[in-house]
Image (cartoon, grey):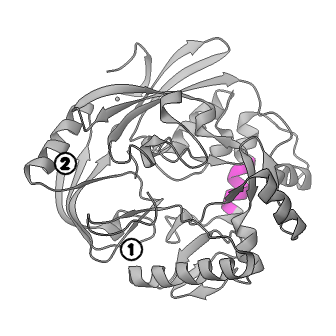
Amino acid sequence: MRLNENILISSLTTMSLGGPARYVLEVETPRDIADAYGFARTLKLPTFVLGYGANTIGRDEGFNGVIIINRMQGMFEEPIENGIRLKIMGGEYWDHVVEYACNKGLTGIEALSKIPGLTGAAPVQNIGAYGQQISDVLTEIEVFDTQTDSVKTLSHDELQFSYRHSILNTTEYGRYFVISITLELHVGVMPRPFYNSIETFMSDHALTDFSPAGIRAVVSAIRTEKLPDPSEKASAGSFFKNIYLSETDAETAESNGIPIRRGDDGIKINSAWLIEQCHLKGKLLHGFRVSKSAPLVLINESAQSYADLNAARAEIVNKVYDKFGYWLEQEPVEIVNAEQPNPAAAPGTTPIQNTPIYGAN
């Protein structure tokens, strides 16, 4: 475990905002986790679990507590019928996992290619893209329970997944530190019809490779074209969530000319469309650029403070509400001190008998 003091949150997050964190602890083995929380308790300081920092925003006043970063790495697999059960340590970079699975011809997560972040954060908000979500293939996670100071396993059903939600960022927010996740992946291809943008891209480029590697290549190309690389342009990925509706509300929206998408995950309005209809695409607001290619993304071009973000967010949210009557909900989590409100909600295992791919527990 590594201990650092007074580290700027702006250096730990891709939006490049945030003052100093009093302590930053990097845990490298499951044994480090109890020590990290014990350290915080001894000093009577709050904790915040941080991953890659791509879906997290810091505030100017910093964090008077302990940020814990998951550095545990390793992947372990065991065979199952027509596939593998894959256990991944929470500190693994997520896209490396997707690449590994696709190279083995395994379907289930290929549409989740190029999502920046660590594996431990994937189940927290049930990451999803282009018709797939992590809950489709996740069977269980191994966690450190901060209430009992013990390691336990949570099943898929116990996590209560829904769109961008699980108990990890709702009812049990802050309780569990994700040590590892386990996926069941099978040889095969993603069922058609694909998500509209995938179908369109494949048609426009006359592509016929529907294998996991082929879909990964398409998704990677789409994301590269539409979404800025947070390592090159400061952003937090998609800043606003899409809006989910009941069937009755969807019918009302359609009668008002708002396009609706119906899928296995529910009925939704694309929030990017709402932002674009408010003529905000490409606009510079208080130092933040609304992306021309992906209006859900805010790019920090010149903002220096959280106040700038607050002003830009309010302008977008209010314009969408004034025009359409829908409130946009922020997706990124914010690192806040105990006395401050948080407009969003945070991330992160006794091993099974698996064959290690690399790394170790």
Q: Give me the residue at 49% from left, 35% from top.
A: 159
Q: Of the residues shown, which amino acid type is indicated by label 2?
A: Arg
Which mark identifies residue 2? 2
Q: Please indicate whether residue 134 sits to the left or right of residue 64 in the image.
A: right
Q: Nearer the viewer, residue 210 or 24?
A: 24
Q: Secondary structure at mark 2?
A: strand
Q: Quadrant of residue 80?
A: top right
The answer to whether residue 221 is magenta is yes
The image position of residue 42, as x and y in percent, is: 8, 48
Q: Is residue 338 visible?
A: yes
Q: Main secondary structure of the magenta part?
A: helix
How many callouts does the rendering have? 2
Q: Of the residues shown, which amino acid type is indicated by label 1?
A: Leu
The image position of residue 327, as x and y in percent, is: 62, 70
Q: Nearer the viewer, residue 119 or 140?
A: 140
The answer to whether residue 39 is magenta is no
The image position of residue 165, as x and y in percent, is: 53, 47
For label 2, the crowd category at 10 Å Cα-Cα, with few meaning under 14, some 14 to 19 and many 20 or more, is few
Q: Which residues are magenta?
A: 218-224
Q: Secondary structure at mark 1?
A: loop
Q: Nearer the viewer, residue 96 or 270?
A: 270
Q: Please indicate whether residue 151 sits to the left or right of residue 56 in the image.
A: left
Q: Split into 4 quadrants, where in the image is the C terminus?
A: top left
> From the viewer's perspective, is residue 354 above or below residue 279?
above
Q: Which residue is mark 1?
A: 17
For label 1, the crowd category at 10 Å Cα-Cα, with few meaning under 14, some 14 to 19 and many 20 or more, is many
Q: Nearer the viewer, residue 29 or 221?
A: 29
Mark closer to the chain start, 2 or 1: 2
> From the viewer's perspective, is residue 320 above or below residue 107?
below
